[in-house]
Image (tube, grey):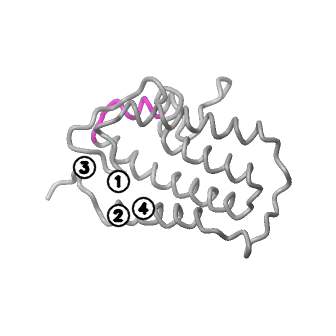
Amino acid sequence: MPYSPIQKTAWDYGLVGIQVLLGLAYLLPVGAYWPEALPHTPGWVAGLAIGLGLFMGGNGLWQIREHLSPFPSPKAHAQLVTDGAYALVRHPIYTGIVLILAGYALYTSHAYRLAITGLLLLLFYFKSGYEERKLQAMFSEYRWYKKRVGRLWPRLPWR
């Protein structure tokens, strides 16, 4: 059978499963077992991260509405979106999630939550790489989009 970028594989299910487990781990009430070891962060820093995350992730969700899937394999009738939040980063929903969770971890001074956020960022890096291989197979213009726009963080203009 020929390669199909929309066909889900064990990788799709595994990556989403790990993401769910990390999300649940983030929510665990571990305060009694894991000391709140982070120094106090000014509320405006945490609020800024959460606000940027809500803005970025919310716009990303809004733009792909009916094409949204937890799986990295694109849906059959997916369209490549390269404007709005997707003009800043190729994966604004992942970026938004990381910013929201990091902001909340800083606000609550929980080192545990910040560590889980770091693991989620690492997962999103690998998940987005897998997703991009499939998107490149589906959309010929994806290669040029990758050159212009950063994966999880905006590209610096002088880079």
Spatial CA span between label 3 and label 1: 10 Å
Spatial CA span between label 2 and label 1: 7 Å
* Residue pointed to by mark 2: 13
Q: Amino acid at mark 1?
A: Phe
Quarter location, residue 113: bottom right
Image position of 47 (left or right of 62): right
Furthest toward the bottom, the residue is 33
Residue 140's x, y, as percent? Answer: 31, 33
* Residue pointed to by mark 1: 71
Furthest toward the left, the residue is 1
* Residue pointed to by mark 4: 15
Mark 2–mark 4 CB contact (< 8 Å): yes
Quadrant for the N terminus in the image: bottom left
Label 4 neighbourhood size at 10 Å, few (<14), some (14-19), many (20+)?
Answer: some
Mark 3–mark 2 CB contact (< 8 Å): no
Residue 15's x, y, as percent? Answer: 42, 61
Label count reads: 4
